[in-house]
């Protein structure tokens, strides 16, 4: 069983986006909830609901899809890359947080004040572990 929660979250969302599913269900943890709140705040998701079945809690996500032109050409809106892994943790101070493509890519950082975007970490002057990047 895979214990990497971030990899499971990224894979679930990426697969749903590639298969054009609008609604997916993900197991709820505090880490996934905070990452999903960032995705919602940045406009990648349209709706988030909490759902429980017995002892298990789930998050039901509605993805935002992009349809291009009248030919209904579909383009994936979510692109993820996991940076830190359980075998290789990558930490940055606030001065050295990388600006990837001139801040067009959103980095998600785990800090002492919670999970926030890279721009918020630089403005609050706190560093942390770079979990993943979204574009």
Image: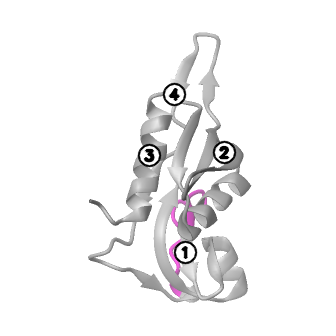
Dot 3 or dot 1: first in sequence order is 3
**For the residues marked 4 and 1, what is the alpha-carbon distance in whole angstroms?**
28 Å
- Horizontally, residue 25 falls left or right of residue 120, namely left
The answer to whether residue 88 is seen in the rendering is yes
Q: Which residue is identified by label 2? A: 45
Asked if the residues shown at circle 4 and circle 1 are in contact, with their CB atoms under 8 angstroms apart, the answer is no
Q: Which residue is mark 4?
A: 20
Which colouring convention does the figure follow? one colour
- The quadrant of the image that shows the N terminus is bottom left
Q: Tell me if residue 66 comes above or below residue 30 in the rendering.
A: above
Other residues around mark 4 within 10 Å, as few (<14) / some (14–19) / many (≥20): some
Outermost residue to the top: 71
Q: Nearer the viewer, mark 2 or mark 1?
A: 2
| Between discs 2 and 3, the one toward the N terminus | 3
- Badge 2: residue crowd in 10 Å (few <14, some 14–19, many ≥20): many
Q: Which residue is mark 3?
A: 12
Q: CA distance from mark 2 to mark 3?
A: 14 Å
Residue nearest the viewer, comparing 96 with 76:
76
Residues in magenta, as a range: 96-107
Q: What residue did someone put label 1 on?
A: 109
74 or 18: which is nearer to us?
18
Residue 125, horizontal then vertical, whole percent: 67, 89
SS of the residue under disc 4: loop
Comes first in the chain, label 2 or label 1: 2
At a point 52% along the width and 89% down the height, the residue shown is: 93
Label 1 element class: strand
Q: Residue at x 69, y 52 (%)?
A: 40
- Give the overall secondary structure of the magenta segment: loop
Instruction: Write the residue at 45% across / 43% down.
Output: 14
Q: Write the residue at 54% across / 18% down.
A: 73
Q: Position of residue 17 (x, y in %)?
A: 50, 36
Give the image location of residue 70, x and y in percent. Answer: 64, 11
């Amino acid at each position: 069983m895979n214990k990497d929660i971030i990899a499971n979250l990224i894979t679930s969302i990426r697969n749903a986006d590639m298969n054009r599913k609008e609604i997916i269900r993900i197991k709820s943890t505090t880490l996934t909830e905070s990452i999903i709140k960032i995705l919602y705040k940045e406009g990648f998701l349209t709706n988030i609901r909490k759902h429980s079945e017995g002892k298990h809690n789930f998050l039901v996500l509605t993805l935002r899809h992009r349809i291009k032109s009248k030919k209904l050409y579909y383009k994936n809106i979510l692109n993820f890359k996991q940076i830190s892994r359980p075998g290789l943790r990558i930490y940055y101070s606030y001065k050295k947080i990388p600006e990837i493509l001139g801040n067009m890519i959103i980095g998600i950082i785990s800090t002492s004040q919670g999970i926030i975007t890279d721009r918020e970490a630089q403005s609050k002057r706190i560093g942390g572990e770079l979990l993943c990047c979204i574009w």
